Amino acid sequence: MAVVTSKEMFKKAYEGGYAIGAFNVNNMEIIQGITEAAKETNAPVILQVSAGARKYANHTYLMKLIEAAVIETGLPICVHLDHGDTFELCKSCIDGGFSSVMIDGSHHSFEDNIKLTKQVVEYAHDHGVVVEGELGRLAGIEDAVNVSDADASYTRPEEVEEFVSRTGVDSLAIAIGTSHGAYKFKPGQKPQLRFDILEEVGRRLPNFPIVLHGASSVIPEYVKMINENGGKMPDAIGIPEDMLRQAAKMAVCKINIDSDLRLAMTATVRQYLREHPDHFDPRQYLKPARENIKELVKHKIINVLGCDGKA
C-alpha cells in the first residue's frame, strides 16, 4: 500500500454514512498512536500536517515517518496539508509528496477565495493531488489560525454551488458551529451544530464530500488530568460526539481532530512525571502518551466516525 488521495475514501464514506478521521500529526509518537489505532480497527486514515507542524518537525522527517507508517500498517493513508493559506505553501507540499492539500481562502472575499482556490486546484490536479477548499470561518485558535468570535461566520449555502463549480475543489470545509482549539464553549453554554445548514449544503451539492474542522470534543478526563498534575486549563465543553456521529451520517466525509490528541498526550506526560519525578528518559513518559493517543483514536474511529472495518 502507498500514500493515497482521499477521493476513493470519501466516495465510500458518503455512500456508507460514515466519516474518515483526519488527525493532526507533529512527531513520531503521535503518528504511531494514530496509525496503530487505524490498523487495529482496519480503518482508513488521513494524517494532517499544519504549516506549524511542518516547520517544527521538518517536511522530510514527517514524510519519512508517514512512509514508515504505511509500511508498518499496510493501510491506505492520505497525507493532507491542513489550512494552507498560500499557493506557495500548497505547491511546496504537493511537490514534496502530499496527496491532498487544503487551501483556506476563507479570510478573503468570495471572489478572491475562488481565485486563490482555483489556482491551487489547477496545479494540484495536474500533479494527481486533491484539494479541499473552505467557505465560512470557524472561531478559535489553532496553530496559525486565529479567528475571533466577532469574525466567525456560518457558511452560506447559497454560495456553495458556485464556489465548487468555479474552483473545481474535491471537498469543502464548512462552518456550522464547530470551532478550533480546546476552549470552544464555556460551562453552561449549549453546543449546537447547524444541521439545517449542513442539510441544505448537502441538498445543493449531492454526493459531494463535506469537511468539519474544529471537531475535538475536549474530553473532560484529560482536562482533569492536566489540572490535577500542575496545569491550569479552564473548564470547557467541546463538540458532543453524538452530534459528530450525526454529521458523519449526513454529507460529512472528513472530521478533523487535533486538540483531543494534544490533550491526551499532555495529560499523560504531566501525570507520569508527577508520579515519577526521578525519571528523565523520554521513552518512559512518551510510551504511555502514545498508548493513550492510540486508545483515543480507536474510540473516535469506532464510536464517532464509524469507519472501523472500512480500510
Image: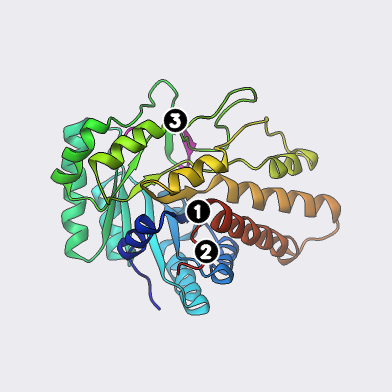
Q: Cα distance, mark 1 to mark 3?
A: 23 Å
Q: Are marks 2 and 1 in contact (CB under 8 Å)?
A: yes
Q: Does residue 105 appear to the left or right of 305 in the view shown? A: left
- Considering only vertical position in the picture, is 2 above or below 262? below
> In the visual, does 72 lie left or right of 17?
right
Helix, strand, or loop for circle 2? loop
Residue 20: image location, x then y, percent: 44, 57
Q: How many marks?
A: 3
Decide which of 113, 93 is in the foreground and name it.
113
Mark 3, residue position: 139
Q: Which stretch appears magenta?
A: 135-143
User: What's the residue at 67%, 49% (across, down)?
Assistant: 266
Judge whether 18 appears above or below 33 on screen. Answer: above
Q: Quadrant of the C terminus?
A: bottom left
Which amino acid, mark 3? Answer: Ala
Q: How far apart, in angstroms, are the residues tagged by discs 3 and 2?
A: 30 Å
Q: Amino acid at mark 2?
A: Asp
* Residue at x 28% of width, y 61% of height: 94
Q: Residues within 10 Å of mark 1 (few under 14, many from 20)?
A: many
Please state, as top left, top right, bottom left or bottom right, where the N terminus lies in the image. bottom left
**Corner quadrant of residue 55:** bottom left
Which residue in the structure is indicated by mark 1? Answer: 305
Measuring from the top left, give residue 113's x and y in whole percent. Answer: 22, 38
- Residue lying farthest to the left in this orientation: 166
Residue under label 2: 308
Question: On the picture, is 306 further left or further right than 168?
Answer: right
Q: Position of residue 159 (x, y in %)?
A: 21, 33
Tag nearer the camera, 3 or 2: 2
Secondary structure found at label 1: helix
User: Is residue 290 rendered magenta in the image?
Assistant: no
